[in-house]
Image (cartoon, rainbow, N blue to C red):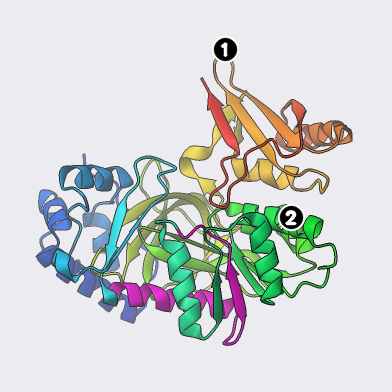
């Protein structure tokens, strides 16, 4: 059965030309998309954005995983000879098998250009000193942000291979004024710095640039990060290894992420029907890369739940609200991880937390462990009940016993 067509978002003339160039090159030179388009009769370029939405199929992560399994190790979604590729990165694999992704020097340079735009929007300028509190593993974002900051003219310090204590000391000793990491790690590093360097109340960090988790656009999490870093500005951004940097926060408008529209054709669809949703409605973000020609993605279903508005330019209200498949139903109530985080982070005395979703009984149940004083149990319990209309047990965990990560935090465990 053919997928339902989505009504296209507006496309500026320059971006329509970029889309046509992408499709022309991909149909002719990319084995993965050559087969995929031939199977549904998409041998010609679309006549209009509406024709593109009507005839060209979505791409899913499952298809890409299967393609890499059938054509190891990199799959067949390559528009250049393998000898032209000089970068290899991979996804985290948090929602399935990891994907390897290759870039040519040209496509990598285009991604760096996009990250420079993110840095500039955050108010970062040549001469700033940026500490990158990452492990510098195989994930794309760490390396890309680092090289973009170099291109911008910043002094870049890599925090790979360091303990949190050492990172705190190196950050202070080098007078870094920008920190780049996940929201979770920004909170953890700030806590360690305050405990081990109580004289560092005047630490020079003025901007905390976060990505990798929705927390950067969650009001209570942003406030916690800001207070942990003595009032530093918090700036959100999001991207994916498969597509590169996608959005950045609109300066002065926390929680509003702007799509990098010169690099992406974005759609927001109903995840069930595939039809486009209206402005202000929740849906799944679908992306077509316009500059990453050597390893493209066309109508890629990201799995990210968003609310889009055209202002002009597509803006994601509230940032990335979560994953489409993250929602759980508990006694008839739809519960998203971002809603739980916003409520828990509203209690400054709570450090880390973990949610257990148990489906082993006749009904789905939630419970929450928190690191904090026993006095927080009743107020948090009441807040959860009033906000979600659910009674969710809250228990105290011993300080430092819940998992922590410098990468994407895994605060939900599912039993059953």
Q: Residues within 10 Å of mark 1 (few under 14, many from 20)?
A: few
Residue 189 in the image: state x and y as whole percent. Answer: 69, 57
Q: Mark 2 or mark 1, which is nearer to you? A: 2
Residue displayed at 51% across by 39% down: 326
The one nearer the camera, 397 or 52, is 397
* 123 in the magenta segment: yes
Number of numbered callouts drawn: 2
Residue 388, x across and y down, in percent:
71, 35
Write the residue at 62% across / 82% down: 128
Left or right position of 393 against 311: right
> Residue 192's x, y, as percent?
74, 55
On residue 362, which mark appears? 1
Q: Nearer the viewer, residue 66 or 2?
A: 66
Q: Secondary structure at mark 1?
A: loop
Q: Residue furthest right?
A: 375
CA neighbours of label 2 inside 10 A, class few (<14), some (14 to 19), many (20+): some
Where are the magenta residues, as a range? 107-136
Q: Quadrant of residue 27?
A: bottom left
Residue 34 seen = yes
Residue farthest top in this picture: 362
Res 221 quadrant in image: bottom right
The secondary structure type at the circle numbered 2 is: helix
Q: Position of residue 366 (x, y in %)?
A: 65, 26
Q: Quadrant of the N terminus?
A: top left
Is 377 on the left-hand or right-hand side of 248?
right
Q: Is residue 244 left or right of 223 when viewed as pictured? A: left
In the image, 183 versus 7, the foreground residue is 183
Q: Which residue is mark 2?
A: 192
Q: Quick one: label 2 or label 1, which is nearer the N terminus?
A: 2
Residue sitting at 52 percent across and 61 percent down? Answer: 160
């Amino acid at each position: 059965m053919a997928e339902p067509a989505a009504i296209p978002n507006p496309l500026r003339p320059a971006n329509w030309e970029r889309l046509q160039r992408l499709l022309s090159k991909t149909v002719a030179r990319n084995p993965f998309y050559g087969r995929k388009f031939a199977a549904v009769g998409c041998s010609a370029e679309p006549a209009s954005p509406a024709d593109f939405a009507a005839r060209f199929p979505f791409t899913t992560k499952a298809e890409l995983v299967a393609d890499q399994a059938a054509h190891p190790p990199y799959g067949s979604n390559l528009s250049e000879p393998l000898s032209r590729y000089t970068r290899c990165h991979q996804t985290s694999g948090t929602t399935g098998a990891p994907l390897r992704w290759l870039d040519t020097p040209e496509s990598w340079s285009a991604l760096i250009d996009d990250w420079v735009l993110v840095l500039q929007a955050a108010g970062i300028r040549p001469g700033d000193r940026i500490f990158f509190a990452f492990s510098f593993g195989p994930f794309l974002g760490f390396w890309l942000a680092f090289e973009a900051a170099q291109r911008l003219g910043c002094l870049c310090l890599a925090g790979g291979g360091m303990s949190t204590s050492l990172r705190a000391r190196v950050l202070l000793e080098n007078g870094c004024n920008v920190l780049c990491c996940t929201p979770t790690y920004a909170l953890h590093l700030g806590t360690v710095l305050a405990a081990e360097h109580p004289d560092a109340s005047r630490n020079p960090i003025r901007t905390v640039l976060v990505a990798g988790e929705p927390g950067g656009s969650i009001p209570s999490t942003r406030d916690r990060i800001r207070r942990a870093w003595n009032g530093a500005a918090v700036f959100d951004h999001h991207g994916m290894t498969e597509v590169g940097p996608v959005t950045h926060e609109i300066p002065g408008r926390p929680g509003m992420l702007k799509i990098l529209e010169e690099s992406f054709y974005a759609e927001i669809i109903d995840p069930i029907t595939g039809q486009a949703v209206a402005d202000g409605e929740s849906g799944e973000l679908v992306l077509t890369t316009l500059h990453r020609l050597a390893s493209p993605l066309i109508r890629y279903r990201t799995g990210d739940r968003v609310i889009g508005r055209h202002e002009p330019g597509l803006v994601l209200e509230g940032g990335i609200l979560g994953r489409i498949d993250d929602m759980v139903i508990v006694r008839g109530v739809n519960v998203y991880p971002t809603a739980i985080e916003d409520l828990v982070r509203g209690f400054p005395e709570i450090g880390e937390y973990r949610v257990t979703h148990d489906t082993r009984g006749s009904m789905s149940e939630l419970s929450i462990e928190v690191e904090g004083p026993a006095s927080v149990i009743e107020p948090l319990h009441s807040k959860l009940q009033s906000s979600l209309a659910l009674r969710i047990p809250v228990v105290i965990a011993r300080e430092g016993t819940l998992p922590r990560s410098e990468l994407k935090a895994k605060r939900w465990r599912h039993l059953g």
